[in-house]
Amino acid sequence: MLEQFAVTLRHTAGNPKSGDAAYTVLSEQDFSGACAEITAWEGYEGTPLVSLPGLAEKIGVGRIDYKHEGPRFGLGSFKALGGSYAALRVLQRELSRRLGKDVSLEEIRKGAHKDACAGITLVSATDGNHGRSLAWGCQRFGAPCRIYIHAEVSEGRAVAMRDLGAEVIRIAGDYDDSVLLAKKEAEENGWFVVSDTSWEGYTEPPRDVMAGYSVMTREVCETLEQAPTHVFLQGGVGGLAASVAAALRQFYTVQAPRVVIVEPELAACLFDSARNGKATNFAIQEETIMAGLSCGEPSEMAWEILTEEATDFLTIPDSIVAPAVRLLANAETGDPAVEAGESAVAGLAALIAACQSAGIKETLGLDENSRVLLIGSEGVTDPAIYAAIMAGKDNV
Ligand SMILES: Cc1ncc(COP(=O)(O)O)c(C=O)c1O
């Protein structure tokens, strides 16, 4: 059943430092403010933490807990927590500036400034899930939304954003080109960029995005009886990983788990950053099947946290992604069936592959006492791709 996972993984050790980025780049107030607001939204419900004892036994670890973000706000991924919250915070700052007084999140949420919000355009580049979250937030709060997507983003993902009222602009280049165009057009037109990645001088929305993700981590911590020993975190720009790592550090302090970052071989900017000891860009030559992880430029703020918190960096080949989606869906291990997207299973695929390789398993300190946390970051966000994978296709 697990033969397909016997592949070569690349591993590089992180160089964790005893800094305090997990408290300063994202503060306890950032997290608690986001949690208080988002859990007050209509339709809020925690997502399931699924235990996978059958798989844990098969690969020789103590337990595996898989946080399944598919049902999140009906939007299909954890990203629902980030872009929408950051949109609300941009509106709050801009309305407060325009009106010359403090505007609360609650007032905007309750529609007190609907007319003013209609004049504040929010834009972003996306590979799908962040844009969907932003579009949803804009729809809720009454702001116009423009989303820039690159050539390889599936039409299914574009339609999902249009259905939420966003204007979707498809460009010829890759993800990083779409980020540049969104920035340029925003500057020219007085629009507001709500990005999930940060760069020099641009930190407020990405901080809010990462703060929003902490709702997910808080739910995990409140559900688990014991701290995990390991967490496998998939990386795109690093926002998810940095948010989860910081929130786990704040919650568990010295008991926080060992942080293992997982990226596609085809888009390994965090892996290269770890190797070089500084944030490093990766030139993407070919798109990975893990669309949400196809990022060549680390988020600066995320890297500040990960360089202190991440112990290990792995890359995985695309070939083990579809088998991991099917493994979860078909419940062959006797565990509950879970419907997951390609980017969701990166950590799971890496964990299984790591346990197939005696060397890497030992390097990561994985054994029958390990309690591994996985973040299943998306459900079926693209039904056509999911159907092809379930029909046995590995290359979609
Ligand atoms: C489903 C999914 N998982 C993981 C990620 C990675 O998140 P980040 O880019 O913050 O590292 C993304 C990013 O879009 C995603 O859509």
Image (cartoon, rainbow, N blue to C red):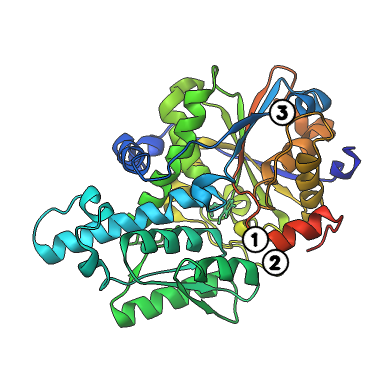
The residue that appears at 53% across and 53% down in the rendered structure is 75
Q: What element carries label 2?
A: loop
Q: Name the residue under label 1.
A: 291
The number of numbered discs placed on residues in the rendered structure image is 3
Quadrant where the C terminus sits is: bottom right
The mark closer to the camera, 1 or 2, is 1
285 or 197: nearer the viewer: 197
Residue 121 visible to an observer of this rendering = yes
Question: Going by the image, does 143 lie left or right of 58?
Answer: left
**Residue 97 x/y as whole percent:** 15, 63
The mark closer to the camera, 2 or 3, is 3
Please, is residue 389 above or below residue 251 in the view?
below
**Residue 171 x/y as whole percent:** 56, 80
Q: Residues within 10 Å of mark 3 (few under 14, many from 20)?
A: some
**Residue 282 x/y as whole percent:** 61, 62
Mark 1–mark 2 CB contact (< 8 Å): yes
Please, is residue 86 above or below residue 147 in the view?
above
Mark 1–mark 3 CB contact (< 8 Å): no
